[in-house]
Amino acid sequence: MENKPLDNQVWQWGDACYAKNQALCLMLQDSYAVNVNLLLLALYLDNTRTGVSADTSSKQTSSNLFSSKQWQILITGVMEWDDKLIVPYRRLRRLAKDRLSQTEYEQMLAVELMLERKAQRTILNAVNGLSPTGQQTNLVSYLTLFGLSAADVNALDFIAP
């Protein structure tokens, strides 16, 4: 199977996945400094890599597995944007929550979402430039970078959309 570049469909799937797993995503973000966009990308790749086939020996099942080293490249590629814009803005939004009307708070959330979308474009550009070399699931390759064991990762109970 030929690798085709990822497009914005990944983020539509990610939005649906986030809606079902918001608490778990935010726990990983707040407790381990996991980038939720990269987390959703790892989940997307793992949940869509086998298509409808249950045959785990096919080349298709490994065609989108990225190594921990490749996930580190993706982290580094989005880190500056996150560190300089998204993280401080998120902190400000959380601090201001009790002092804002619901409308004002929702406006702040909308700005944060716009910043996240820009980060997603950066991620797509970076991931489309990589040739997958991973040997384990993307979720394991990504989350072990944050000190979680493969067993810890496999115990996470994500709900696919």
Image (cartoon, helix red, strand yellow):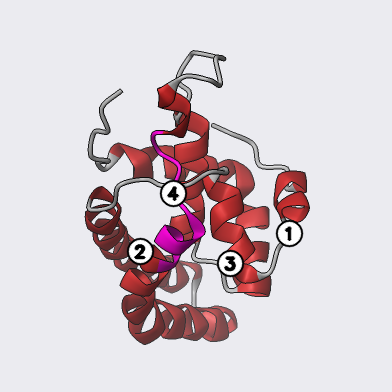
- Going by the image, does 50 lie left or right of 140? left
Question: Quick check: 6 left or right of 31?
Answer: left
Q: Is residue 52 above or below residue 112?
A: above
Residue highlighted by disc 1: 149
User: In whole angstroms, how far apart are the C-alphas of marks 4 and 3?
Assistant: 13 Å
* Residue assigned mark 4: 66
| Mark closer to the chain start, 3 or 2 | 2
Question: Which of the two discs, 4 and 3, labels the residue nearer the N terminus?
Answer: 4
Which residue is located at x 32 percent, y 70 percent? 77
N-terminal-most mark, 2 or 4: 4
Horizontal arrangement in the rendering, residue 146 relative to residue 112 (left or right): right
Magenta span of residues: 63-72
Q: Nearer the viewer, residue 99 or 130?
A: 130
Identity of the residue drawn at 51% across and 37% down: 46
Mark 4 and mark 3 in contact? Answer it, CB < 8 Å.
no
Dot 3 falls on a residue whose secondary structure is: helix
Report x, y in % for residue 118: 26, 63
Q: Secondary structure at mark 4?
A: loop
- Amino acid marked by disc 2: Glu
Residue picked out by circle 2: 116
